[in-house]
Amino acid sequence: MNGWDHLEDFLRYLRVERQLSPHTLRNYRLDLTQFLEFCAGHGEGLSLDKVTYQDLRPFLAAALQKNRKTTVARKLSALRTFFKYLQRQGVASQNPAKLAPAPKLEKVLPHYLSVDEAFHLLGEPKGDDFGTRRDLAILEVFYGGGLRLSELAGLNCTDVDLASGVLRVWGKGGKERLAFLGQPAKDALSAYLPLRQRHLEQHGTTDETALFINSRGSRLSTRGAARVVAKWVRLAGLSPGLTPHGLRHSFATHLLEGKADLRAVQELLGHASISTTGRYTHLNLTRWPCECLPGPGRTRTPRPRSPGGFRSARPRSHPLPPR
């Protein structure tokens, strides 16, 4: 077997055994294809069982000149996983990518909305037509459930239990979890679903199982859902840098500002590691008064006053836990 055959076997393993998303598989294919092309242009060709750290250095150096550090870190991670797989298959005797240091990445705090900004965004869609009702339901589910973009686009009608306000979500690696919706999200879905059914009947696609559909009566793509968010962010006059993932960041940040337990937020977000959820504690602390932060001789952090004006906000059900 040549390197390309090993790549196809590896991608099949990632898809079947690890159940990685199509987007992740595309990145693996792209990064490893570039590496195999580099090996093919290395003199008479460089076989995978003979690749050393010294061979990887020029490939990573060239990648660093053309790409951001985050992209190079992704390529290095793909190489480490690929060579680990080749070791288990008996193709490679070592993992040269483990010796390569990862580029130092800058810590970028995710963009998120204040509570008042979130209310303003969710109050922007007004209308009884199919498009507006659908868009409002999308925004409410994004913010109220803390879903990823791919998770929202992958929702089916059978995943929704409006009576209990529960969504069955399929996250990364095909892992299932439950997301909980407040009353505004349930109301938005209740108003949208009859229009969805009428829309499907008009287009002759009544067998469509997707919860969110496009104008043609088929499943709304991840790109389509992202455009919905971008449209209403623009109309609301908010920062154009807010993405669907920014609504997820807002969901987590507002929970932690309401003193929710970090482990509980980890479960709601579907994070495999608590350290990933821990990023949101930095966001939370930057908005608290200095006297509320831990200092010398303090054994516990006093509860801060509500920074987002929660008491003055209009009453609605949102991710903050009950007092």
Image (cartoon, rainbow, N blue to C red):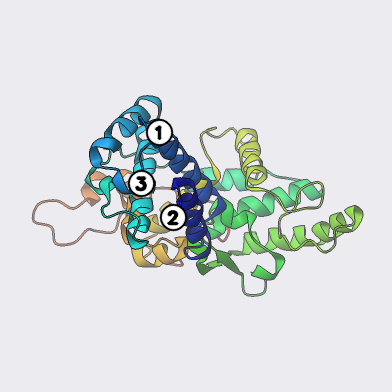
Q: Which residue is mark 1?
A: 38
Q: Which residue is mark 3?
A: 48
Indicate the position of residue 293 as horizontal and vertical percent values. 22, 50
Indicate the position of residue 246 as horizontal and vertical percent values. 49, 45
Establish if 61 lies above or below 21.
above
**Which residue lies at the image location 38% right of the left edge and 43% below the top edge?**
74
Establish if 183 lies above or below 285.
below
Q: Is residue 247 visible?
A: no
Residue 252 badge? 2
Q: Using a 10 Å C-alpha cutoff, classify the residue at mark 2 as few (fewer than 14 neighbours), some (14 to 19) or many (20 or more).
A: many
Which of 259/195 is in front?
A: 195
**Which residue lies at the image location 82% right of the left edge and 57% below the top edge?**
195
Q: Using a 10 Å C-alpha cutoff, classify the residue at mark 1 as few (fewer than 14 neighbours), some (14 to 19) or many (20 or more).
A: some
SS label for mark 3: helix
Q: Amino acid at mark 3?
A: Leu
In the rendered structure, which disc, 2 or 3, sits on the residue that comes first in sequence?
A: 3
Q: Using a 10 Å C-alpha cutoff, classify the residue at mark 3 as few (fewer than 14 neighbours), some (14 to 19) or many (20 or more).
A: some
Of the 4 image quadrants, the one containing the C terminus is: bottom left
Q: Amino acid at mark 1?
A: Phe
Q: Mark 2 near mark 3, Cβ–Cβ under 8 Å?
A: no
SS label for mark 2: helix
Q: CA distance from mark 2 to mark 3?
A: 43 Å
Residue 272 in the figure: left or right of residue 33: left
Q: Amino acid at mark 2?
A: Ala
Q: Residue furthest toward the front?
A: 44
